[in-house]
Amino acid sequence: MKDTYIQRVPTWFLRGVIFIIGIIALLLCIFSLPKLGHGIAIEYPEIASLRYPVLVGMYAAAIPFFIMLSKALMLLSYIDKNKAFSESSTKALRQIKYGGFTMSLLLYASLMPLFFRVAQIEDAPGIVIIGAIVTSIPIVVAVFSAILERLLRSAIDLQAENNLTV
């Protein structure tokens, strides 16, 4: 009985980390994004008209982010139930993959021209690097989940093949 609780400690730790990340992201969406939009309008009046599209893009990016967090929690629950090698796990990983690509390619990459414009106004090319980093993080998560999905699919196929031979 103690072994099961000890084995669940890493998944409970990861759940806690996911909840903390979710709370921080929610607080950023509630408090920081409106201030960011207002700050863009005051600091850069020549691109103030882009304030609302930027805010819409950032809030739209939050939707797949929170979906990805919920799928990660589901994946941890499958691991706790010893159902890590199941179709449900591959489906959760696939949805995390699609969420990462959606966040990065459709939402953040579409905001990169704004980063270029602010970098030109401020004469600070580091702003473009920050934008590239923000854009590439969800891609890294998506690629990692795609690799895990493929490995999990191979393991499930191998397990099914071994069950048929026995």
Image: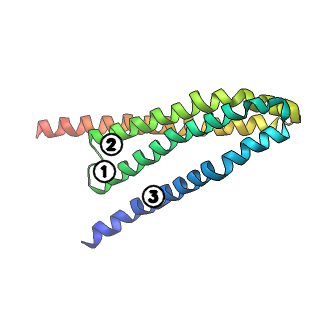
Q: Amino acid at mark 3?
A: Leu
Q: Which residue is mark 2?
A: 89
Q: Which residue is mark 3?
A: 14
The residue closer to the viewer here, 107 or 78, is 107
> Looking at the rendering, which quadrant does residue 139 occupy?
top right
* Distance between mark 2 and mark 3 Cα atoms: 16 Å
Q: Position of residue 5 (x, y in %)?
A: 32, 69
* Circle number at residue 36: none
> Looking at the rendering, which quadrant does residue 104 occupy?
top right
Q: How many marks?
A: 3
Q: Amino acid at mark 1?
A: Tyr
For mark 1, does the 10 Å Cα neighbourhood hold few (<14), some (14 to 19), or many (20 or more) residues? some
* Circle number at residue 78: 1
* Distance between mark 2 and mark 1 Cα atoms: 7 Å
Q: Amino acid at mark 2?
A: Ser
Q: Position of residue 90 (x, y in %)?
A: 33, 38
49, above or below 23, in the image: above
